[in-house]
Image (cartoon, rainbow, N blue to C red):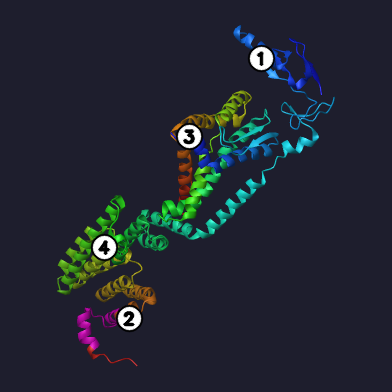
Amino acid sequence: MIPGFVISIATFPGVIIHEAAHLLFCRIFKLAVFEVCFFRVGNPAGYVIHERTDSFAASFFVSMGPFMVNSLLCVVFCATAFLPVWELNISDPLAFFFYWLGLSIGMHAFPSTEDLKHIWQLARVKLSGGNILAAASMPLVAVLYVLNFARVVWADLVYGIAIGVLGPLALLKALA
Amino acid sequence: MRSGKCVQCGKEGSLSSFYEVNQRIYCEPCANSEVERLRSMQAPISASSLIDGTVCGVCGADWGKKELPRAGAVPYCSTCHDKIYRRGFPGWLKAGLAFALVLLGFSLVHGAKYFQAGLAKARGEKLIRQKQYAAAAHELQKVVAVAPGCEECILLTAKAELLAGEPQQAYRRVSSYNGGKFKDNELSKEVDGLFERVGKALELSKKSSQAYEQKNPEEALRLMKEAQKTFPEWPDFQVNVAILKAGIAFDRKDYDGFLAASEEGYRLAPHQPSAAAQVASALACKYVATGDESYRQRAEQMLAKAQTLAHASVEDRTRIDEYAERIHYRMDAKVIIDKEQYDRTVRRTAQPRS
């Protein structure tokens, strides 16, 4: 069992991007941000304290922001490394650097359990008002909630590898 | 700043230092003991800290009696507005992201050849699935030029080359990699199997040529059919079968059979000038046998097609010119003779043209 802080240190770019994504969506939805910690050796490794809102869209995107931004950047950085390392068997140091960067970012894509709980509760309330985004978000939130618990068996790393390898592969097949 | 008073001990102070427990105001020690008391009675508890709307929750500035706007529950002053609503990304984060993007840009430029090779590999695999082996080999050759250590790429290229009819090139490729040793997997087994079958088929094809040279076209045809059965992926064997069938039909003076077999050969290899010329030859035979002018016209058309196809190669051009001369003689003299007879009788007596 590797302690969480060791994993956080080894994958610190992912923690920073995760918090930066929260901040980015707070800015987009004009929510007040009271405190930001991009990285620290502790639990949690980073956090953003922001204004609560009744808007489901704002809550959803602020909480799920890291999932979208981290996943996208994971695919972008891994795509650079994917071809030489995975497809062509070329030992390029820059490619390995990008694989580390991409996978570190991808590993921190999952929103925190607290964020997921908050969206779930808000979604249940908004669902009765016929909010389509609330209805659509519930299966994703449920899956991510389960995956968050599966982090003890490296579900976050598996997710990073899956999108870092399968994403560029799908892109390549589509372009060919 | 607003002030508050504890309902328990009567202590007074700033409102924000007090707590509300079940809608009654307490100082911190009294709030703690009240919560404990309620907990022991298992009574419902609603507790929160009090927020003074005249004190900025961000910088702590006291604005007297002025009620401040709130972000959620937190009051904030005008000087803190930008700090909480327009909180920027720190410089080190922007610099780090900029550095990563520059590195990414450099990597994309540096890795452009990998990208091209990766695309070529995907295209090559797709072309193999579509059975377009020559085009697949062309794409995959670009990949191994960039990634000479990629075992899968070498095996895929060799597979495409074998199926495209370039066994020597495929052999050179696999033998120049790691002494011809590959990991034992499905692809390496498949390529091994292809090499084995191609070897057998080429041997049979060679024997077929020998039989043909020894004036045994029936045996040549049997061996060529065997070669085709051994390696059906290779269209050349099928074309050779059609050519041999055409030759046998010609020898038997079965000009309908000759025409049918020649047309089959041309259908299989429409880019081969000799296949087009053989159809012209068969049509010329039909013209001589029937006197039907339409056969002559079609023969001329096929000859023109053969000459167009032979345009790029000097060797092909020479061969087709020689063929055309014999076909024209056949139609002009209305005599059907084979090449040997023609060389012996016509070419020996012919005068060189000025």
Judge whether residue B298 is colored magenta. Answer: no
Judge whether residue B343 is colored magenta. Answer: yes
Q: Which residue is mark 3?
A: A3
Question: Which of label 3 and label 4 is nearer to you?
Answer: 3
- Numbered label attached to residue B238: 4
Q: Which residue is mark 1?
A: B32
Residues indicated by labels 1 and 3 sit on the same polypeptide chain: no
Residue in the foreground of this view, choosing between B329 and A66: A66
> With B240 as the anchor, is B216 left or right in this view?
left
Q: On screen, A122 above or below B132?
A: above
Residues indicated by labels 2 and 3 sit on the same polypeptide chain: no
Mark 1 surroundings: few (<14), some (14-19) or many (≥20) residues within 10 A = some
Residues indicated by labels 4 and 2 sit on the same polypeptide chain: yes
Q: Which residue is mark 2?
A: B318
Q: Distance from label 2 to label 3 (Cα)?
A: 79 Å
Which chain does tag 2 point to? B
Numbered circles on residues, count? 4
Residues indicated by labels 1 and 2 sit on the same polypeptide chain: yes
Q: Amino acid at mark 1?
A: Asn
Q: Secondary structure at mark 2?
A: helix
Which chain does tag 4 point to? B
Q: Distance from label 3 to label 4 (Cα)?
A: 67 Å
Please state the horizontal and vertical placement of residue A85, each as a whole percent of the image: 43, 52
Residue in the foreground of this view, choosing between B65 and A170: B65
- Cβ atoms under marks 4 and 1 closer than 8 Å: no
Question: Which of label 1 and label 2 is nearer to you?
Answer: 1
